Amino acid sequence: MKLVMAIIKPFKLDDVREALSSLGIAGMTVSEVKGFGRQKGQTEIYRGAEYSTNMVPKIKVEVVCDDDLAPRVVEGIQAAANSGAIGDGKIFVLEVGQAVRIRTGETGETAL
């Protein structure tokens, strides 16, 4: 099993969700996060005063899937989240040692 973790721009979430649904992904975890990379932060205006913030709002999408499905999940997220601009995000793929469905006690891939 693989954990596919993607950091994307917030306005791309619906596109990513639709891409994952079309691949048969039944669930995902979404978190609002902040961070910076090459984008270096942003300038905002609050009550008429301009200020800079080092942290840019992003969305973190996490999906656990079969090893065979992981490359297609990565391709789907990349295609859906790509705007061609700096700050589109990153995708990380990690190995998952074990999964357990709390309600039934199922383990491994049947717990997905």
Image (cartoon, rainbow, N blue to C red):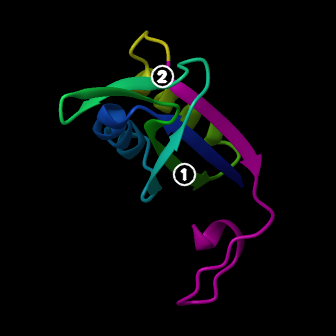
Furthest residue toward front: 49
Judged left or right of residue 90, residue 99 is right
Residue under the image location 53 percent in, 19 percent down: 39
Residue under the image location 61 percent in, 53 percent down: 65
- Could you tell me the amino acid type at mark 2? Asp
Q: Earlier in the sequence, mark 1 or mark 2?
A: 1
Residue 72 position by quadrant: top right
How far apart are labels 1 and 2 at the CA level? 16 Å
Judged left or right of residue 81, residue 96 is right
Judged left or right of residue 56, residue 51 is left
Furthest residue toward left: 48
98 over 14 or under it: above or below: below
Q: From the image, which quarter does the C terminus lie in? A: bottom right
Pointer 2 residue: 88
The image position of residue 98, as x and y in percent, is 76, 69
- Could you tell me the amino acid type at mark 1? Glu
Out of 111 and 33, give the one closest to the viewer.
33
The image position of residue 21, as x and y in percent, is 36, 46
The image position of residue 96, as x and y in percent, is 75, 58
Out of 63 and 106, give the one closest to the viewer.
63
Residue 71 in sight from this viewpoint? no
105 over 49 or under it: above or below: below
Q: Which residues are magenta?
A: 87-112
- Judging from the image, what secondary structure is the residue with disc 1 in? strand
Residue 27 covered by magenta stretch: no
Rate crowding at label 1 as few (under 14), some (14 to 19) or many (20 or more) other CA atoms within 10 Å.
some
Out of 45 and 58, give the one closest to the viewer.
45
Residue 62's label in the rendered image is 1
Q: From the image, which quarter does the N terminus lie in? A: bottom right
Q: Mark 1 or mark 2: which is in front?
A: 2
Residue 96 covered by magenta stretch: yes
Residue under the image location 63 percent in, 88 percent down: 105
